[in-house]
Amino acid sequence: MTYKNVLTYQTHPYIEEYFQLIESGKIPACKEQHQLVAYLKKVLSRDDIYIDEKMVENSVKIPARYFPYELYPWQKFANVFIFGVRWKDDDTLVFDRYFFYMGRGAGKNGFFSYDSFFMLSKQHGIPNYDIDIVATSEGQAKTSFKDVYDVLAMPENEKRLKNAFYRTKMLIVNRATKSEMRYNTSNARTKDGKRPGCVMFDEEHEYENYDAIKVFTSGGGKVKDYREFHFSTDGNVRGGPLDDLKEEARMVLNGEIEDISLFPFICKLDDPEEAKDPNLWAKANPSLPYNKTLKKKMLKEFSLAQRKPAIKIEFMTKRMNSPISDPRFEVATYEDRLATNQPIPPQLKGMDAIGGVDFADVRDFCSCGILMKYKGKRYWLQHTFIHHLALELQDINKDIVQLAVDKGLAEIVYGKSIPPEKIVGWYIKMAKKYYIKKICMDDYRASILGPKLEEAGFDVDIVRRGRVTHSRLSPIVDDCFINHTLVFGNDPLMRWYVGNVYVDFLDNDNKEYKKIDKEKRKTDGFFAFLHALNRDAELEDYGDLDLSSGGSGIKPIIV
């Protein structure tokens, strides 16, 4: 192919076909699909990977002999990264986790059935490559399993494949490879001890916690080419594993996470208003241009949705991957949270700062930070101390935590508790750069931490929290996020904190900021910021003044 002579990245015909569909606009694609193209071109430009073209071709052509349908372009494209893209040094997969997030009817289950058939086969080349399908209900878990079972039972296939496969209503086994395929419900108590080659979590929007995920992935990595698939439309469970996956995928596509083990295939509307144009529905469902029957069905659903709110909610959530929600309940949109990633100017050195501390328990998370103003913007610099038991005992997004630790924004603390000296030491370090006027916290935190800070020479200010305080602060919070005048720097942990909070609208126009989930969706950094914001009026915006020389008379606190 001529493209091999002109492109700067390794490629394959299936890759180029899909890239051209996206880049030409022939198939409408969301922002995340365009980001995926750019991201994969960067990955494919590396000189330490290669594409196993034979494996890719086998993954498409071997099942095609038996299946009653062909793969769509996006599915062939994905197979290059599921089977073909490998590290040169050890021949292992570059991507071993695959997140497919797209509207209902895109053919997710049929796609996995097709690939499962290949992974069971001799041509895949891995013996005892067991496949587990997991879902919250038996009916959903059986969907892909039944597809493969039905293919084996087709009259034209049964005679050819009778000696190759053993099958029952609960188990399919390839006699040559001894690879097994089975389905499971998410009752995790009875599934320990597995050594899977592949695990597929189906319709993850229904998962409320990580119980099943932890059990079914605990045995992974013991078999060559271990793969983990996450297939889902959107749903109504907020704060669960799906939301964590969506956040991780966005961070990968935005270049915030350098780990390239996740393949983030996201299909959704860019704006809910796009649902009014059926020509844009392919943004949420890349199979739609090839499925006229589904398109007709969706047009009927859309017509009904204009008259029936319940159908509209279902249509937007499951078909368009654009859940209908009241934006008032969100502290800040994802885009507004991402906008906090702005540079921290060196001119902040020597400026007035207000500190804020929040923690729920000395064996959990403890966030401390300082708030400053400069040129019409507010700057919040935070650091989080995390007790190791919080990570061991709670369903916390450990990828976010590890990223924060790697960036020096968080620290794992071992021992019986987080000692106050850790927090005091951080503020002493900050006081060498900034003039910390006072450190704000509520009564409970002050009783534990206040005396230690005062001993170090800091002024401790007790502030209130709750509906009255939050109602007073909310106009500032809203303005900062909407106008992109709040800066965290490149702090994914702080953005995560904000995303874990919702606004509860109360009587008499009062508001209260609350946790989405009491345990796993940590919010300490956000509430530390609110504590400091209580004394926002005491901070002067120094504008263009350069205080780094100390000419203003403001000097760092001496402790």
Image (cartoon, grey):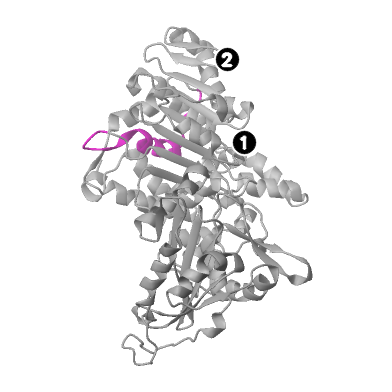
Q: Amino acid at mark 1?
A: Thr
Front one among 256 and 431: 431
> What x and y, as percent, mark residue 54?
29, 29
Query: Is 234 located above or below residue 376 in the figure?
Result: above
Identify the residue position indicated by label 1 in the image: 293
> What x and y, as percent, mark residue 359?
54, 60
> What x and y, as percent, mark residue 23?
41, 53
Q: Is residue 545 left or right of residue 533?
A: left
Q: What is the CA distance from the residue labelled 1 to the residue labelled 2?
A: 30 Å
Disc 1 element: helix
**Circle number at residue 550:** none
Query: Is 179 located above or below residue 519 in the figure?
Result: above
Query: Is 271 located above or below residue 451 in the figure?
Result: above
Q: Quadrant of residue 195?
A: top left
Please give the range of residues in magenta: 68-91
Q: Is residue 500 magenta?
A: no
Residue 107 visible in the shown view: no
Q: Is residue 161 left or right of residue 440?
A: left
Q: Quadrant of the C terminus?
A: bottom left
Q: Amino acid at mark 2?
A: Lys
Query: Is 262 located above or below residue 156 in the figure?
Result: below
Q: Is residue 85 magenta?
A: yes
> What x and y, as percent, mark residue 305?
73, 49
Identify the residue position indicated by label 2 in the image: 169
Task: Indicate which label's residue lies in the foreground, 1 or 2.
Answer: 2
Q: Quadrant of the N terminus?
A: top left
Residue visible at 45% across and 18% down?
180
Front one among 363 and 183: 363
